[in-house]
Amino acid sequence: MATVDLQKTGGGTAGSVELDPIVFEASVRPHLFHAEVRRQLSAKRAGTHSTKNRAAVSGGGAKPYRQKGTGRARQGTTRAAQFAGGGAVFGPVPRGYEHSLNKKTRRAALRGALSLRLSEGSLVVVDTIALEAPKTRDLVSMLTGLDLGDSVLIVVAAEDATLLKAARNLKKTDIILPAGLNVYDVLRHKRLVITREALDAVQARLGDEAKEGGE
C-alpha cells in the first residue's frame, strides 16, 4: 500500500497518509484515457452548425429559362447547388456528438489517471486549504510554498466561495469537488492537490465502486 506525506499549507508535514491500492495503484491504460477524454469533449460540443439545402433557400420558384432550344443544360431552379446563392449539398446539420461509455470503463480510466499522477510524483495531499480572504496572491503564495507550479487541479471536500474567488484569475488552476473529479481535468493539469477530507471521499467513491462491481 502506497503512502504519501500529509503536507501542511503553511509548510512542513503532518505525518503520512495511506492510499487505497485499488484507486492509486491501478493499471495505467492510455487507450482508456483517450476513450474517456474523447467522450467528455464530445459532450461539450454544441452541434449547432447548419446549412440550407435547396428546399430551404428562398427564391428560385420560376424556371430560369425555357427547357429546349437554348443550347444549355436544362435547369428547373436557380436555387440548385450549381448556382450562386443555391442550397448546399449534404451540408452540416444540427446534431449531437455525445456518445456513451460504460461506467466500468470510465471508473477504470479515472483510477488509472490518479495512479499515473501518483507514480509521477505529481500527487500532493494536504491537511486543509483555507484562505482568510478571496485574494489570488494568497493562493499563489500557498501553491508556491508547496512547490506546485502554475498548472494545478485542487480537489476539496466542499464548496468554498473564498477559494473559488481566489482561483478564478488563475488560468491554469481549477477547483473541483470529489464527485466531479474526472479524467480530462486530472490529465490536463500537471499537479493534483487533494485535501485529506476530499481524499477520503474519492477513495470511498472509487474503491467501493470497484468492490461492488467486482473490478
Image (cartoon, rainbow, N blue to C red):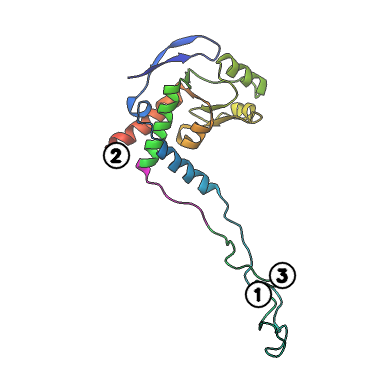
Can residue 182 be seen from the camera position used here?
Answer: no
The amino acid pointed to by label 1 is Ala
The first of marks 2 and 1 along the sequence is 1
At numbered mark 2, what does the secondary structure look like: helix, strand or loop? helix
Q: Verify CB contact (< 8 Å) between mark 3 and mark 1.
A: no
Residue under label 2, please give it: 213
The first of marks 3 and 1 along the sequence is 1
Q: Verify CB contact (< 8 Å) between mark 2 and mark 3.
A: no
CA–CA distance in space, label 2 to label 1: 57 Å
Can residue 27 be seen from the camera position used here?
Answer: yes
Q: Residue furthest bottom?
A: 69
Image depth: mark 2 or mark 3 in front: 3
Residue under label 1, please give it: 80
**Measuring 57% from the left and 26% from the top, which residue is drawn there?**
151
Residue 198 image offset from top left, x and y in percent: 45, 26
Instruction: Using the rendered view, name the quadrant where residue 33 is placed.
Output: top left
Instruction: Using the rendered view, name the quadrant where residue 150 is placed.
Output: top right
Q: Which residues are magenta?
A: 96-104
At numbered mark 1, what does the secondary structure look like: helix, strand or loop? loop
Residue 199 image offset from top left, x and y in percent: 43, 25
**Measuring 54% from the left and 47% from the top, which residue is drawn there?**
44
Disc tally is 3
